[in-house]
Amino acid sequence: MRIANKSPLLFSALMFCLAATSMAELTTNIPKLEIIDTVNGTSIRDAIVTIGRRVLAPDQDGGYIIPQDTTSIMVRAPGYKAATFSVANAVQHKGKLPLIPITVKALYLTEYGIASKSLRDPVFEIIRHGNANALVINIKSDRGLIPYPSQIPLATAIGARKLTTIRSLQDLVKTGHDEGIYMIARIVTFKDDPLATSKPNLAVHTASGALFKDREHLSWTDPFQEEVRAYNIAVAVEAAKAGFDEVQFDYVRFPDCATKLVLSCPVDETSRVKALSTFLNEARDALAPYNVFESVDIFGYVSWNTNDTGIGQQLEDITKIVDYVCPMLYPSGFKYGIPGHRNPLATDADIYDTIKLTLDESLRRTKANPKKFRPWLQAFRDYAFNRREFGANEVATQIRATTDAGASGWSLWNARNQYGGTGLAPTKNPRGNPAGAEPTAASKSDRTH
Protein backbone atom coordinates (compact mmCIF):
# COMPACT_ATOMS: atom_id res chain seq x y z
CA MET A 1 0.00 0.00 0.00
CA ARG A 2 1.38 3.41 -1.03
CA ILE A 3 0.39 6.30 1.24
CA ALA A 4 3.26 8.75 0.79
CA ASN A 5 1.29 11.03 -1.49
CA LYS A 6 -1.89 11.07 0.58
CA SER A 7 -2.91 14.20 2.48
CA PRO A 8 -2.05 14.38 6.19
CA LEU A 9 -5.76 14.30 7.03
CA LEU A 10 -6.37 11.17 4.96
CA PHE A 11 -3.23 9.57 6.37
CA SER A 12 -4.41 10.19 9.95
CA ALA A 13 -7.84 8.78 9.17
CA LEU A 14 -6.26 5.71 7.62
CA MET A 15 -4.04 5.14 10.64
CA PHE A 16 -7.04 5.51 12.96
CA CYS A 17 -8.97 2.89 10.98
CA LEU A 18 -6.02 0.52 11.00
CA ALA A 19 -5.58 0.99 14.75
CA ALA A 20 -9.29 0.45 15.36
CA THR A 21 -9.25 -2.67 13.22
CA SER A 22 -6.19 -3.95 15.01
CA MET A 23 -7.81 -3.29 18.43
CA ALA A 24 -11.02 -4.99 17.35
CA GLU A 25 -9.02 -8.01 16.18
CA LEU A 26 -7.15 -8.10 19.48
CA THR A 27 -10.37 -7.90 21.47
CA THR A 28 -11.95 -10.60 19.35
CA ASN A 29 -8.97 -12.82 20.11
CA ILE A 30 -9.34 -12.51 23.88
CA PRO A 31 -10.87 -15.63 25.37
CA LYS A 32 -13.23 -15.24 28.31
CA LEU A 33 -11.22 -13.62 31.11
CA GLU A 34 -10.34 -15.46 34.27
CA ILE A 35 -8.71 -13.64 37.19
CA ILE A 36 -6.11 -15.83 38.87
CA ASP A 37 -3.68 -15.80 41.79
CA THR A 38 -0.20 -15.18 40.42
CA VAL A 39 1.33 -17.48 43.05
CA ASN A 40 -0.74 -20.63 42.67
CA GLY A 41 -2.80 -20.02 39.53
CA THR A 42 -6.16 -20.57 41.22
CA SER A 43 -9.22 -18.53 40.32
CA ILE A 44 -9.80 -15.47 42.50
CA ARG A 45 -13.08 -14.93 44.28
CA ASP A 46 -14.84 -11.53 44.19
CA ALA A 47 -12.72 -9.97 41.45
CA ILE A 48 -13.89 -6.59 40.15
CA VAL A 49 -13.23 -6.08 36.42
CA THR A 50 -13.71 -2.53 35.16
CA ILE A 51 -13.63 -1.11 31.61
CA GLY A 52 -13.63 2.69 31.80
CA ARG A 53 -16.55 3.41 34.13
CA ARG A 54 -18.27 0.11 33.46
CA VAL A 55 -17.95 -2.72 35.97
CA LEU A 56 -18.38 -6.05 34.22
CA ALA A 57 -20.57 -8.74 35.71
CA PRO A 58 -19.16 -12.26 35.64
CA ASP A 59 -21.06 -14.93 33.74
CA GLN A 60 -22.41 -18.07 35.39
CA ASP A 61 -18.95 -19.67 35.23
CA GLY A 62 -17.26 -16.66 36.85
CA GLY A 63 -15.62 -15.46 33.64
CA TYR A 64 -15.73 -12.01 32.00
CA ILE A 65 -16.54 -11.15 28.38
CA ILE A 66 -14.62 -8.08 27.15
CA PRO A 67 -16.37 -5.52 24.90
CA GLN A 68 -14.80 -4.98 21.47
CA ASP A 69 -13.96 -1.32 22.09
CA THR A 70 -11.78 -2.16 25.12
CA THR A 71 -8.32 -0.57 25.38
CA SER A 72 -7.42 -1.42 28.99
CA ILE A 73 -8.75 -3.70 31.68
CA MET A 74 -8.68 -2.73 35.37
CA VAL A 75 -8.85 -5.55 37.91
CA ARG A 76 -8.89 -5.71 41.69
CA ALA A 77 -9.98 -8.20 44.35
CA PRO A 78 -9.93 -8.37 48.15
CA GLY A 79 -6.58 -9.70 49.32
CA TYR A 80 -4.77 -8.73 46.10
CA LYS A 81 -3.06 -5.70 44.59
CA ALA A 82 -5.07 -3.87 41.94
CA ALA A 83 -3.68 -4.05 38.39
CA THR A 84 -4.34 -2.68 34.92
CA PHE A 85 -3.83 -4.77 31.80
CA SER A 86 -3.76 -3.81 28.15
CA VAL A 87 -5.70 -5.85 25.62
CA ALA A 88 -2.35 -7.13 24.35
CA ASN A 89 -1.55 -8.32 27.90
CA ALA A 90 -4.85 -10.18 28.04
CA VAL A 91 -4.15 -11.91 24.72
CA GLN A 92 -0.61 -12.75 25.82
CA HIS A 93 -1.92 -14.29 29.06
CA LYS A 94 -4.61 -16.18 27.09
CA GLY A 95 -7.30 -14.50 29.14
CA LYS A 96 -5.84 -15.49 32.50
CA LEU A 97 -5.02 -12.22 34.27
CA PRO A 98 -2.83 -12.65 37.36
CA LEU A 99 -3.12 -10.59 40.55
CA ILE A 100 -0.46 -10.43 43.26
CA PRO A 101 -1.70 -11.38 46.76
CA ILE A 102 -1.16 -8.95 49.62
CA THR A 103 -1.92 -9.14 53.32
CA VAL A 104 -2.37 -5.51 54.38
CA LYS A 105 -0.82 -4.75 57.77
CA ALA A 106 -1.54 -1.08 58.43
CA LEU A 107 -0.56 1.53 60.97
CA TYR A 108 -2.60 4.70 61.46
CA LEU A 109 -1.21 8.23 61.17
CA THR A 110 -3.22 11.36 61.76
CA GLU A 111 -2.86 14.46 59.60
CA TYR A 112 -0.36 15.63 62.23
CA GLY A 113 1.44 12.30 62.52
CA ILE A 114 2.30 12.11 58.82
CA ALA A 115 3.88 15.58 59.06
CA SER A 116 5.83 14.90 62.27
CA LYS A 117 9.29 13.40 61.84
CA SER A 118 9.26 12.06 65.41
CA LEU A 119 6.03 10.15 64.78
CA ARG A 120 6.42 9.31 61.11
CA ASP A 121 9.99 7.96 61.12
CA PRO A 122 9.40 5.18 63.71
CA VAL A 123 6.39 4.02 61.69
CA PHE A 124 8.45 3.89 58.50
CA GLU A 125 11.09 1.87 60.37
CA ILE A 126 8.48 -0.71 61.35
CA ILE A 127 7.51 -0.96 57.70
CA ARG A 128 11.13 -1.19 56.49
CA HIS A 129 11.73 -4.11 58.85
CA GLY A 130 8.77 -5.99 57.43
CA ASN A 131 6.37 -5.88 60.37
CA ALA A 132 3.84 -3.66 58.57
CA ASN A 133 3.32 -2.68 54.95
CA ALA A 134 0.53 -0.10 54.86
CA LEU A 135 -0.47 3.32 56.18
CA VAL A 136 -3.89 4.73 56.96
CA ILE A 137 -3.63 8.52 56.74
CA ASN A 138 -6.27 11.16 57.52
CA ILE A 139 -7.13 13.27 54.49
CA LYS A 140 -10.40 14.45 56.08
CA SER A 141 -10.03 14.48 59.82
CA ASP A 142 -12.25 13.80 62.79
CA ARG A 143 -12.79 17.56 63.03
CA GLY A 144 -13.68 17.85 59.36
CA LEU A 145 -10.40 19.44 58.29
CA ILE A 146 -8.87 18.72 54.89
CA PRO A 147 -5.09 19.05 55.41
CA TYR A 148 -3.97 19.14 51.77
CA PRO A 149 -4.48 21.69 48.94
CA SER A 150 -7.91 20.44 47.88
CA GLN A 151 -9.48 21.88 44.75
CA ILE A 152 -13.01 21.43 46.12
CA PRO A 153 -14.52 24.95 46.45
CA LEU A 154 -16.82 23.93 49.31
CA ALA A 155 -13.85 22.84 51.43
CA THR A 156 -12.43 26.38 51.34
CA ALA A 157 -15.82 28.05 51.75
CA ILE A 158 -16.63 26.24 55.03
CA GLY A 159 -13.17 26.68 56.58
CA ALA A 160 -12.09 23.05 56.25
CA ARG A 161 -8.83 24.19 54.61
CA LYS A 162 -7.42 26.20 57.51
CA LEU A 163 -4.78 23.54 58.17
CA THR A 164 -2.12 22.22 55.78
CA THR A 165 0.10 19.37 56.93
CA ILE A 166 0.20 17.56 53.58
CA ARG A 167 1.54 19.81 50.83
CA SER A 168 0.75 17.43 48.00
CA LEU A 169 -1.34 14.26 47.99
CA GLN A 170 0.47 13.05 44.87
CA ASP A 171 3.90 13.51 46.47
CA LEU A 172 2.73 11.80 49.65
CA VAL A 173 1.49 8.78 47.73
CA LYS A 174 4.66 8.63 45.62
CA THR A 175 6.81 8.69 48.77
CA GLY A 176 4.80 5.81 50.19
CA HIS A 177 4.85 3.78 46.99
CA ASP A 178 8.60 4.31 46.65
CA GLU A 179 8.88 2.58 50.05
CA GLY A 180 6.59 -0.24 48.91
CA ILE A 181 3.75 0.97 51.13
CA TYR A 182 0.07 0.30 50.46
CA MET A 183 -1.54 3.72 50.90
CA ILE A 184 -4.99 4.17 52.45
CA ALA A 185 -6.81 7.52 52.58
CA ARG A 186 -9.08 7.82 55.64
CA ILE A 187 -12.08 10.11 55.22
CA VAL A 188 -14.18 10.95 58.27
CA THR A 189 -17.54 11.28 56.59
CA PHE A 190 -20.75 12.43 58.27
CA LYS A 191 -19.15 13.72 61.45
CA ASP A 192 -18.23 17.11 59.99
CA ASP A 193 -18.28 20.18 62.22
CA PRO A 194 -17.14 22.73 59.58
CA LEU A 195 -19.82 21.73 57.08
CA ALA A 196 -22.57 21.41 59.70
CA THR A 197 -21.87 24.78 61.31
CA SER A 198 -21.34 26.64 58.03
CA LYS A 199 -24.44 25.15 56.41
CA PRO A 200 -26.99 24.34 59.13
CA ASN A 201 -29.46 23.20 56.47
CA LEU A 202 -27.13 20.22 55.91
CA ALA A 203 -26.75 19.41 59.62
CA VAL A 204 -28.34 17.12 62.18
CA HIS A 205 -30.52 19.02 64.67
CA THR A 206 -32.03 18.37 68.07
CA ALA A 207 -35.79 18.47 68.65
CA SER A 208 -35.43 22.09 69.79
CA GLY A 209 -33.94 23.09 66.43
CA ALA A 210 -30.38 23.55 67.73
CA LEU A 211 -27.40 21.92 66.04
CA PHE A 212 -26.72 18.48 67.47
CA LYS A 213 -23.41 18.26 69.35
CA ASP A 214 -21.74 14.95 70.24
CA ARG A 215 -19.62 14.18 73.30
CA GLU A 216 -16.72 16.08 71.71
CA HIS A 217 -19.02 19.06 71.10
CA LEU A 218 -18.83 18.51 67.35
CA SER A 219 -21.73 18.70 64.92
CA TRP A 220 -22.76 16.12 62.31
CA THR A 221 -24.10 16.34 58.79
CA ASP A 222 -27.23 14.74 57.38
CA PRO A 223 -26.58 11.56 55.29
CA PHE A 224 -29.93 12.04 53.52
CA GLN A 225 -28.64 15.20 51.85
CA GLU A 226 -27.16 14.80 48.37
CA GLU A 227 -24.80 17.76 48.84
CA VAL A 228 -23.30 16.14 51.95
CA ARG A 229 -22.71 12.86 50.15
CA ALA A 230 -21.29 14.57 47.06
CA TYR A 231 -18.80 16.58 49.14
CA ASN A 232 -17.32 13.48 50.76
CA ILE A 233 -17.23 11.64 47.45
CA ALA A 234 -15.34 14.58 45.91
CA VAL A 235 -12.67 14.17 48.60
CA ALA A 236 -12.50 10.46 47.82
CA VAL A 237 -12.05 11.14 44.10
CA GLU A 238 -9.16 13.51 44.85
CA ALA A 239 -7.52 10.72 46.85
CA ALA A 240 -8.06 8.26 43.99
CA LYS A 241 -6.63 10.68 41.43
CA ALA A 242 -3.57 11.14 43.67
CA GLY A 243 -2.92 7.40 43.46
CA PHE A 244 -4.03 6.06 46.85
CA ASP A 245 -4.57 2.31 46.77
CA GLU A 246 -7.66 2.51 48.93
CA VAL A 247 -10.24 5.04 50.10
CA GLN A 248 -11.53 4.26 53.58
CA PHE A 249 -14.70 5.93 54.85
CA ASP A 250 -15.07 6.29 58.61
CA TYR A 251 -18.09 7.62 60.52
CA VAL A 252 -20.41 6.35 57.80
CA ARG A 253 -23.30 6.34 60.22
CA PHE A 254 -25.89 8.37 62.03
CA PRO A 255 -25.01 9.77 65.47
CA ASP A 256 -25.54 7.37 68.37
CA CYS A 257 -27.81 9.45 70.54
CA ALA A 258 -30.53 8.53 73.01
CA THR A 259 -32.58 11.67 72.34
CA LYS A 260 -34.67 12.40 69.26
CA LEU A 261 -32.76 13.98 66.38
CA VAL A 262 -34.20 15.86 63.42
CA LEU A 263 -32.95 15.34 59.86
CA SER A 264 -34.27 16.22 56.43
CA CYS A 265 -36.16 12.92 56.09
CA PRO A 266 -38.14 10.76 58.50
CA VAL A 267 -35.73 8.55 60.40
CA ASP A 268 -36.24 4.86 61.05
CA GLU A 269 -34.11 1.76 60.59
CA THR A 270 -35.07 1.29 56.95
CA SER A 271 -34.31 4.89 55.99
CA ARG A 272 -31.02 4.90 57.87
CA VAL A 273 -29.77 1.74 56.18
CA LYS A 274 -30.89 2.99 52.78
CA ALA A 275 -29.13 6.35 53.24
CA LEU A 276 -25.78 4.72 54.03
CA SER A 277 -26.13 2.19 51.22
CA THR A 278 -26.93 5.03 48.82
CA PHE A 279 -23.76 6.86 49.83
CA LEU A 280 -21.51 3.81 49.53
CA ASN A 281 -23.00 2.90 46.14
CA GLU A 282 -22.57 6.46 44.88
CA ALA A 283 -18.96 6.47 46.07
CA ARG A 284 -18.30 3.12 44.42
CA ASP A 285 -19.64 4.40 41.10
CA ALA A 286 -17.60 7.63 41.29
CA LEU A 287 -14.41 5.72 42.12
CA ALA A 288 -14.88 3.07 39.40
CA PRO A 289 -12.60 4.75 36.80
CA TYR A 290 -9.64 4.71 39.22
CA ASN A 291 -9.57 1.02 40.18
CA VAL A 292 -9.19 2.03 43.82
CA PHE A 293 -10.43 -0.12 46.70
CA GLU A 294 -13.38 1.18 48.74
CA SER A 295 -13.56 0.29 52.43
CA VAL A 296 -15.70 1.33 55.36
CA ASP A 297 -15.19 1.27 59.13
CA ILE A 298 -18.04 -0.14 61.24
CA PHE A 299 -18.71 -0.68 64.93
CA GLY A 300 -17.71 -4.07 66.31
CA TYR A 301 -21.20 -4.77 67.63
CA VAL A 302 -22.59 -4.48 64.09
CA SER A 303 -21.25 -8.00 63.54
CA TRP A 304 -23.50 -9.28 66.34
CA ASN A 305 -26.58 -7.06 66.05
CA THR A 306 -29.14 -8.10 63.45
CA ASN A 307 -30.62 -4.59 63.35
CA ASP A 308 -28.75 -1.44 62.28
CA THR A 309 -27.46 -0.76 65.83
CA GLY A 310 -29.52 2.44 65.69
CA ILE A 311 -26.98 4.13 63.41
CA GLY A 312 -27.69 2.72 59.95
CA GLN A 313 -24.89 0.14 59.86
CA GLN A 314 -26.35 -3.18 58.73
CA LEU A 315 -23.68 -5.81 58.16
CA GLU A 316 -25.16 -7.71 55.22
CA ASP A 317 -25.98 -4.55 53.25
CA ILE A 318 -22.57 -2.97 53.71
CA THR A 319 -20.64 -6.15 52.90
CA LYS A 320 -22.36 -6.44 49.52
CA ILE A 321 -21.23 -2.96 48.42
CA VAL A 322 -17.63 -2.31 49.47
CA ASP A 323 -14.35 -4.10 48.75
CA TYR A 324 -13.29 -4.22 52.42
CA VAL A 325 -15.27 -4.11 55.66
CA CYS A 326 -13.17 -2.84 58.58
CA PRO A 327 -14.91 -3.63 61.88
CA MET A 328 -13.45 -1.88 64.91
CA LEU A 329 -12.75 -4.94 67.07
CA TYR A 330 -11.10 -3.21 69.99
CA PRO A 331 -11.77 -5.46 72.99
CA SER A 332 -12.27 -2.30 75.06
CA GLY A 333 -15.12 -1.34 72.73
CA PHE A 334 -17.21 -4.40 73.66
CA LYS A 335 -18.33 -2.97 76.99
CA TYR A 336 -21.23 -5.46 77.22
CA GLY A 337 -19.00 -8.35 76.19
CA ILE A 338 -19.89 -10.91 73.52
CA PRO A 339 -21.63 -14.29 73.89
CA GLY A 340 -19.56 -16.42 76.23
CA HIS A 341 -17.17 -13.60 77.13
CA ARG A 342 -18.61 -11.02 79.50
CA ASN A 343 -15.18 -9.43 80.03
CA PRO A 344 -13.22 -9.36 76.74
CA LEU A 345 -10.04 -8.42 78.62
CA ALA A 346 -10.14 -10.95 81.43
CA THR A 347 -7.47 -13.19 79.86
CA ASP A 348 -5.49 -13.51 76.65
CA ALA A 349 -7.99 -16.18 75.62
CA ASP A 350 -10.83 -13.68 76.02
CA ILE A 351 -8.99 -11.15 73.85
CA TYR A 352 -8.38 -13.80 71.21
CA ASP A 353 -11.98 -15.05 71.24
CA THR A 354 -13.42 -11.53 71.08
CA ILE A 355 -11.66 -10.99 67.75
CA LYS A 356 -11.97 -14.50 66.34
CA LEU A 357 -15.61 -15.12 67.26
CA THR A 358 -16.73 -11.71 66.00
CA LEU A 359 -15.11 -12.35 62.63
CA ASP A 360 -16.56 -15.86 62.58
CA GLU A 361 -20.02 -14.42 63.22
CA SER A 362 -19.53 -11.87 60.41
CA LEU A 363 -18.67 -14.66 57.99
CA ARG A 364 -21.53 -16.86 59.17
CA ARG A 365 -24.05 -14.09 58.60
CA THR A 366 -22.76 -12.75 55.29
CA LYS A 367 -21.33 -15.93 53.68
CA ALA A 368 -18.72 -13.49 52.35
CA ASN A 369 -15.16 -14.06 51.27
CA PRO A 370 -13.07 -13.83 54.48
CA LYS A 371 -10.62 -11.61 52.60
CA LYS A 372 -13.28 -8.88 52.49
CA PHE A 373 -12.72 -8.30 56.23
CA ARG A 374 -9.79 -6.34 57.63
CA PRO A 375 -10.39 -5.39 61.27
CA TRP A 376 -9.09 -2.50 63.30
CA LEU A 377 -7.17 -3.81 66.32
CA GLN A 378 -6.40 -2.15 69.64
CA ALA A 379 -2.97 -0.60 70.28
CA PHE A 380 -3.93 1.65 73.19
CA ARG A 381 -4.59 1.27 76.93
CA ASP A 382 -7.96 -0.17 77.93
CA TYR A 383 -10.51 2.40 79.08
CA ALA A 384 -13.55 0.20 79.86
CA PHE A 385 -12.46 -2.68 82.09
CA ASN A 386 -9.11 -2.89 83.87
CA ARG A 387 -6.90 -0.19 82.31
CA ARG A 388 -4.77 -2.95 80.81
CA GLU A 389 -1.91 -1.75 78.61
CA PHE A 390 -2.07 -3.22 75.11
CA GLY A 391 1.53 -4.13 74.41
CA ALA A 392 3.31 -6.74 72.32
CA ASN A 393 1.48 -9.71 73.82
CA GLU A 394 -1.99 -8.22 73.40
CA VAL A 395 -1.29 -7.03 69.86
CA ALA A 396 0.14 -10.45 68.90
CA THR A 397 -2.93 -12.16 70.36
CA GLN A 398 -5.30 -9.99 68.31
CA ILE A 399 -3.29 -10.51 65.11
CA ARG A 400 -3.25 -14.28 65.64
CA ALA A 401 -7.05 -14.28 66.02
CA THR A 402 -7.43 -12.21 62.85
CA THR A 403 -5.16 -14.53 60.89
CA ASP A 404 -6.90 -17.65 62.21
CA ALA A 405 -10.25 -16.23 61.05
CA GLY A 406 -8.89 -15.87 57.51
CA ALA A 407 -9.26 -12.08 57.39
CA SER A 408 -7.27 -10.00 54.93
CA GLY A 409 -4.78 -8.43 57.32
CA TRP A 410 -5.37 -5.81 60.00
CA SER A 411 -4.94 -2.17 60.99
CA LEU A 412 -3.65 -0.93 64.34
CA TRP A 413 -5.27 2.09 65.96
CA ASN A 414 -3.33 4.35 68.26
CA ALA A 415 -4.59 7.94 68.32
CA ARG A 416 -1.15 9.16 69.37
CA ASN A 417 0.51 7.31 66.48
CA GLN A 418 2.92 5.57 68.87
CA TYR A 419 3.63 1.90 68.11
CA GLY A 420 6.89 1.31 69.95
CA GLY A 421 5.32 -1.04 72.50
CA THR A 422 3.39 -3.18 70.03
CA GLY A 423 6.14 -5.72 69.40
CA LEU A 424 6.33 -4.57 65.78
CA ALA A 425 9.06 -1.97 66.20
CA PRO A 426 12.63 -3.02 65.37
CA THR A 427 14.91 -3.53 68.36
CA LYS A 428 18.63 -2.84 68.67
CA ASN A 429 21.32 -5.49 68.43
CA PRO A 430 23.85 -5.94 71.25
CA ARG A 431 26.13 -3.30 69.68
CA GLY A 432 23.37 -0.76 69.87
CA ASN A 433 22.77 -0.47 66.14
CA PRO A 434 19.26 -0.70 64.68
CA ALA A 435 18.65 -4.20 63.43
CA GLY A 436 15.81 -6.37 62.32
CA ALA A 437 14.99 -8.36 65.42
CA GLU A 438 13.85 -11.94 65.47
CA PRO A 439 10.20 -11.65 64.36
CA THR A 440 7.72 -11.24 67.18
CA ALA A 441 4.74 -13.53 67.55
CA ALA A 442 2.76 -10.88 65.67
CA SER A 443 5.01 -10.78 62.64
CA LYS A 444 5.54 -14.56 62.59
CA SER A 445 1.80 -15.14 62.33
CA ASP A 446 1.22 -12.57 59.62
CA ARG A 447 4.29 -12.17 57.43
CA THR A 448 3.91 -10.47 54.07
CA HIS A 449 3.42 -12.76 51.09
Image (tube, helix red, strand yellow):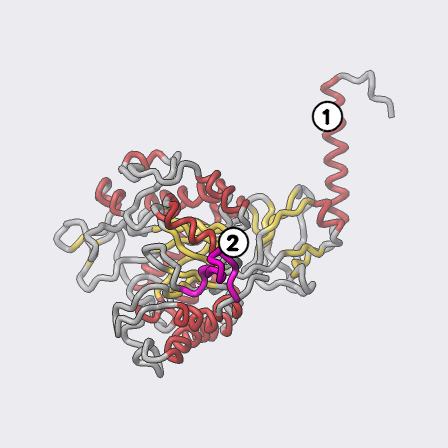
Taking the spot 40% from the left edge, 55% from the top edge, the residue there is 108
Nearer the observer, 60 or 222 = 222
Q: Residue furthest front?
A: 431
Residue beneath label 1, please? 13
Quarter of the figure with the N terminus = top right
Report the magenta residues as a range. Answer: 422-438
Q: Which mark is residue 128?
A: 2
Q: Are marks 2 and 1 in contact (CB under 8 Å)?
A: no
Nearer the observer, 233 or 425 = 425
Residue 80 in the image, given as x and y percentages of width and height: 58, 58
Residue 30 in the image, given as x and y percentages of width and height: 74, 50
Residue 116 lies in what quarter of the image? top left
Nearer the observer, 163 or 447 = 447
Report the magenta stretch's main SS. Answer: loop
Element type at marker 1?
Answer: helix
Dot placed on the residue nearer the N-terminal end, 2 or 1: 1
The amino acid at mark 2 is Arg
Is residue 321 visible in this depiction of the protein?
A: no
Nearer the observer, 61 or 324 = 324
* Crowdedness near tag 2: few (<14), some (14–19) or many (≥20) residues, C-alpha within 10 Å: some
Is residue 142 visible in this depiction of the protein?
A: yes
- Magenta span includes 431: yes
Taking the spot 35% from the left edge, 34% from the top edge, the residue there is 153
Taking the spot 72% from the left edge, 19% from the top edge, the residue there is 9
Q: Residue furthest bottom?
A: 340
